[in-house]
Amino acid sequence: MAEEGLEIPKFVVDLSLPPRQRYDHIVPHFQPKIDSCNLHELFDELLVELAGEKLGNWLKNISPALLRRVRGPEETEELVGISRASGISKHILVAFNVLLDLLLGCTSGGVRVAEEKSPPRTRASSKSSSRASRMIHFRTLDWGMDRLRNIVVELDFVRHRGGPVIATSLTYLGYVGVLTGVRKGLSMSLNFRPHHASSTWWDQAAFRYNQAMVVLGFRHSISSLLRQTLLGPPAQQHHKPAEKKEKRFISTSPTGELDEFSEADVRSLLSKLTTSPSTSAYLIFCTPQKVYVVDKDNRRGPVRDSDTFLTAYNHDVADEKDPSQLKDAVAEIAQGPTIMGMDDIVACSLDRKCHLDELWRKSVDAFEKKNGESARAISMADVREFVRDPEIRNEETHYAIIMDPTDGKVLWRRIFEEGT
């Protein structure tokens, strides 16, 4: 089968540089595409669709005074540098960073993959024995803002010039949080969640208050928290008292590779994330031996896990038993901005899950039949077929990626043009 999609531009970000200078070498390569995206116009259109023409124009006029920063000082400094290099107003970049992670339709998951090269089986080996295997993280990112396809970029982070790559992120140029990333021992992705706690007045008020605090730069967005996880020390080390008092950029940590995330570190991370204030989202984490899905809401977040196969889309588990809840959510989303295209993506979420579940079952059966093993695993070629399947990768898909948390590397990635 011919390879679909296009290669994604790849650059190195040196964290030892002052934050304002880290993207200076990248922006010139994208300048024509940045200009064609016209984020200023996109922002104006979004405000008008959200608030109507009169109120939208008023918000447009006051937004430079309101959208002055994101919560992290390092991230804010990076945005100042990108603004200076690209000509995009800082408040537009701030809006891009605090709103984008609320609006993404996606398919994410982890699946156990058998090693392609294993020792030959002996006559004494049991038929039920299986070859070595590891978990692999796959993901497609879907939404309706087609012009942003032009600024998808892969970033390798290093602590000093010429140093080892400590983490990789697949993102949009100008977006300094993390939507998709991998480091040794852990990979992560973020999906839009159409539900949030709303059973009481207090739930609704707390949720909207947190959203306002994020937009105004007084709290971290979820993607900012994921950035801390991707580039910072493992969760257990991060909670040491000596670390808490230090106010320093991530880049001032010791040079060299990051410590590998352990399962204990992941449990500590999940404990912190599930109780933190945030908007609603699905968070997907993959370690070498397990995949975790967090149904995140404000200060809560039940966790599911599996050591074979687990996925997240744009619906809750409860929606699978009662699809009417998802239909109500789709109807509410459809009343929002049409330029996002989120209503159609969410409406197809259950169909994507059913289809991918069936693809996985068939792949497991075929692998076991071919290799004479009960491995509950599949091949890497099967995973590539998952993200290229026409019901998973659709017209709204901006990119697809496969990550290996064992080695902390991206194994495969493609960007897709509009309508392909």
Image (cartoon, grey):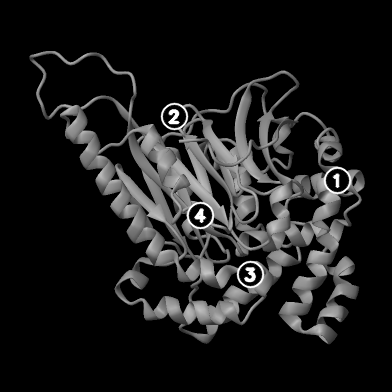
Residues at circles 2 and 1 in contact by the CB criterion of under 8 Å: no
Query: Who is closer to the viewer here, 369 or 15?
Result: 369
- Image height of 125 relative to 264, above or below: above
Helix, strand or loop at mark 4: helix
Q: Mark 4: which amino acid?
A: Leu
Q: Mark 1: which amino acid?
A: Pro
Q: Whole-Å distance between the Cαs marked 2 and 4?
A: 22 Å
State how many labels appear.
Answer: 4
Label 2 environment density (alpha carbons within 10 Å; few <14, some 14–19, many ≥20): many
Q: Mark 2: which amino acid?
A: Thr
Q: Which quarter of the figure has residue 242? A: top right
**Residue 142 visible in the current orientation:** yes
Mark closest to the chain's N terminus, 2 or 3 = 3
Mark closest to the chain's N terminus, 4 or 1 = 1
Can you identify the residue that label 2 sits on? Answer: 406
Q: Is residue 92 left or right of residue 307?
A: right
Helix, strand or loop at mark 1: helix
Q: Whole-Å distance between the Cαs marked 2 and 1?
A: 37 Å
Mark closest to the chain's N terminus, 3 or 4 = 3
Query: Who is closer to the viewer here, 153 or 96?
Result: 153
Q: Is residue 289 left or right of residue 233?
A: left
Helix, strand or loop at mark 2: loop
Can you identify the residue that label 1 sits on? Answer: 32
Mark closest to the chain's N terminus, 2 or 1 = 1
Can you identify the residue that label 4 sits on? Answer: 273
Q: Which residue appears at 84% of the width and 69% of the height?
A: 66
Mark closest to the chain's N terminus, 2 or 4 = 4
Q: Whole-Å distance between the Cαs marked 2 and 3?
A: 35 Å
